[in-house]
Image (spheres, grey):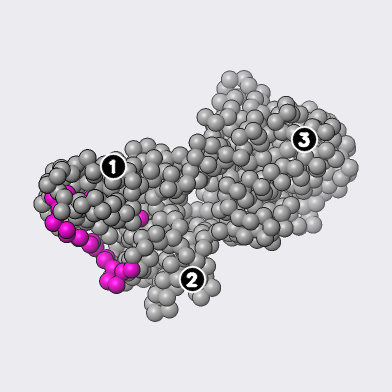
């Protein structure tokens, strides 16, 4: 038994079926140790994974992956699943460049049935997979594991509306922990809490067995499972839930840290052989006291010290917090300003606004579509809503921006957080597409400040002076420009040094370009710079400046197709565009900027080849 829990020597996931319950508890403790040590070094999603260790072990004991398909929603709770499915030896590379992804990836393992970095998609995807199995006469199961935070997303209900009547071997494991990233809100969260505690929902062994005695064919095997449970399955429910009205059987609530209850519950759901919801109650951050005490703070962390558990989460020295504090200051002076978030109060820096103006702060849950149209309703009645949202999640609101807001010219402000490359979260979270899709919204205005002070003046103008839809986009992390702004620009800044070569950029890349310029100057070469701040609509003034140069380099931390640089090139300006051509994998921001040719070093290499001796001072 000495090497019984050596993940690299075990035949996983099959060997978890051979463990006694006492061994399962010890194995779970070892997995938690691995999770804490790895995340403390690499950063990552800690609380969510600590809460799903026993749940994952039980799933792999009762089901047979990859024949049975697991769809994790959101995928940041799947670290234990990765450890159990052939990736233990490379787990220390998770979220590092060229290492394991922090989310499920079908191209990484056959045990990952679907990619899932955005919430609430699992039911739809799992139903598609389960339906394909049914059409191919495949009797295996499809299991969607979703948190109660993800359950607040509208797509989840769209999927359930179809799934309940599907007749497939689909099981939805609803992991209830009262948290998404922030504490869950809304009527659904209250309903799930009621299910967990309301006395009328707790059945005795005799009541459950009475139902099973009347259930043809499948009643007997489930009853056998119930009788074998020490807990007599008092928490098995078969009636009076919203899930049953949608066509599902219902099992739970189950203690998500009790292996016996979990095994019994999943075995019962499997025996039903029809769409079933299993409600599992877990504790986010379970097994690590700092994360138990602050599950939101430990949801997604940078590297931290194990001794004191000090995660670097949305520090005060960040664009997000500068945005949140400035918005709060403006709200003191203007009582029509409202702040809206989709379950990201702390991630977007809105905790300051919430504390100061709770009546004008709205957390709508993980529901970006609803958030956008809710803002439209506010704006139509004279309020000025500011929707703070990560670039990658704003993608989900595109139709609402076009239809519900844009047509009427309603004045809302988008605080587009995490714009550009975000780093270790990888393809599902890189904020490189917002420029491409936002510029298709007629009459929109887009700002991309390069420093904290510029962010503040852009936000002021967007809220107090502009009309219609305005977006202020800013990167993850802190201001790295290392430059004092006495009179920051709100439209553009044009630096003329007598060069025949012009470099154009905006946002965070301005800091990289200034580093490249300094190196050119050290080599005796001059470079003019046009820093855009109001990047859209296109400006004839910017175009006129660019037409005055022999060579124009345009550096853009955005997807090439639909980029600002591409649009100016379409106006007949002969520029050389350096932008992003594809999805960007995970790694440190500095590494990824270099990979896509947007680091100071890569800018310097690109420009140097276009200087000649006449360009030297």
- How many residues crowd around disc 1 within 10 Å: few (fewer than 14), some, or many (20 or more)? few
Give percent across and percent down for residue 330.
39, 75
Query: Which of the image's four quarters has the N terminus?
Result: top right
Determine the secondary structure under disc 1.
helix
Q: CA distance from mark 2 to mark 3?
A: 48 Å
Q: Which mark is residue 605?
A: 1
In this orientation, does residue 279 appear? no
Instruction: Give the Cα separation between the discs numbered 3 and 1.
Output: 50 Å
**Quarter of image, res 411:** bottom left
The residue depicted at 19 percent of the width and 41 percent of the height is 610
Of mark 3 and mark 1, the one earlier in the sequence is 3
Name the image quarter holding residue 584. top left
User: Which of marks 3 and 2 precedes in the sequence?
Assistant: 3
Q: Are marks 2 and 3 in contact (CB under 8 Å)?
A: no
Residue visible at 87% across and 45% down? Answer: 231
Q: Is any atom of residue 361 visible in this view? A: yes
x and y percentages locating residue 364 in the rendered image: 52, 59
SS at mark 2? helix
- Return the residue at label 3: 5
Q: Label 3: state its secondary structure.
A: loop
297 within the magenta span: no
Query: In the displayed structure, would residue 398 be above or below residue 449?
Result: above
Q: Which residues are magenta?
A: 484-508
Q: Nearer the viewer, mark 1 or mark 2?
A: 1
């Amino acid at each position: 038994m000495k090497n019984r829990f050596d993940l690299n020597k075990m035949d996983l996931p099959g060997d978890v079926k051979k463990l006694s319950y006492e061994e399962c508890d010890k194995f779970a403790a070892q997995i938690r140790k691995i999770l804490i040590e790895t995340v403390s070094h690499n950063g990552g999603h800690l609380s969510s994974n600590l809460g799903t260790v026993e749940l994952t072990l039980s799933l792999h004991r009762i089901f047979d992956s990859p024949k049975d398909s697991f769809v994790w929603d959101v995928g940041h709770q799947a670290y234990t699943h990765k450890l159990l499915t052939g990736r233990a030896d490379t787990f220390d590379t998770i979220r590092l460049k060229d290492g394991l992804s922090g989310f499920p990836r079908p191209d990484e393992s056959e045990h990952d049935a679907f990619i899932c970095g955005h919430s609430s998609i699992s039911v739809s995807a799992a139903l598609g997979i389960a339906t394909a199995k049914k059409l191919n006469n495949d009797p295996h199961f499809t299991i969607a594991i979703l948190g109660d935070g993800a359950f607040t997303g509208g797509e989840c209900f769209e999927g359930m509306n179809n799934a309940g009547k599907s007749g497939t071997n689909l099981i939805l494991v609803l992991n209830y922990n009262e948290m998404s990233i922030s504490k869950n809100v809304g009527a659904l969260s209250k309903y799930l809490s009621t299910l967990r505690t309301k006395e009328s929902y707790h059945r005795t062994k005799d009541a459950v067995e009475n139902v099973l005695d009347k259930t043809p064919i499948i009643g007997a095997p489930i009853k056998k499972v119930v009788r074998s449970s020490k807990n007599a399955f008092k928490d098995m429910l078969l009636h009076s839930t919203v899930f049953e009205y949608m066509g599902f059987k219902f099992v739970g609530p189950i203690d998500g840290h009790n292996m016996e209850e979990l095994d019994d519950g999943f075995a019962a759901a499997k025996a039903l052989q029809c769409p079933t919801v299993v409600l599992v109650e877990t504790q986010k951050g379970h097994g690590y006291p700092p994360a138990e005490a602050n599950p939101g703070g430990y949801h997604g962390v940078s590297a931290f010290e194990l001794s004191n558990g000090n995660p670097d989460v949305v520090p005060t020295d960040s664009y997000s917090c500068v945005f949140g504090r400035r918005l709060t200051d403006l709200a003191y002076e203007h009582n029509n300003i409202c702040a809206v978030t989709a379950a990201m109060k702390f991630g977007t820096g809105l905790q300051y606004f919430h504390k100061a103006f709770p009546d004008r702060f709205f957390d709508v849950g993980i529901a970006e579509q609803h958030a956008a149209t809710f803002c439209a309703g506010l704006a139509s009645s004279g309020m000025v809503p500011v929707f703070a949202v990560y670039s990658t999640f704003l993608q989900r609101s595109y139709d609402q921006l076009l239809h519900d807001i844009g047509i009427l010219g309603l004045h809302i402000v988008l605080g587009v957080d995490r714009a550009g490359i975000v780093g270790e979260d990888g393809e599902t979270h890189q904020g490189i597409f917002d420029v491409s899709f936002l510029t298709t919204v007629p009459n929109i205005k887009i700002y991309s400040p390069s420093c904290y002070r510029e962010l503040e003046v852009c936000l002021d103008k967007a809220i107090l002076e502009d009309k219609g839809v305005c977006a202020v986009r800013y990167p993850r992390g802190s201001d790295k420009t290392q430059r004092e702004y006495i009179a920051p620009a709100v439209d553009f800044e044009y630096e003329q040094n007598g060069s025949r070569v012009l470099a154009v950029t905006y946002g965070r890349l301005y800091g990289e370009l200034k580093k490249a310029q300094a190196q050119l100057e050290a080599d005796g070469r001059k470079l003019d710079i046009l820093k855009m701040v109001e990047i859209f609509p296109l400006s004839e003034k910017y175009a006129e400046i660019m037409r005055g140069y022999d060579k124009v380099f345009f550096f853009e931390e955005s997807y090439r197709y639909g980029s600002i640089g591409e649009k100016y090139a379409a106006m007949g300006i002969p520029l050389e565009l350096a932008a992003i051509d594809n999805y960007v994998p995970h790694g440190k921001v500095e590494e990824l900027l270099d990979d896509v040719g947007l680091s100071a070093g890569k800018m310097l290499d690109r420009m140097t080849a276009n200087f000649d001796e006449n360009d030297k001072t």
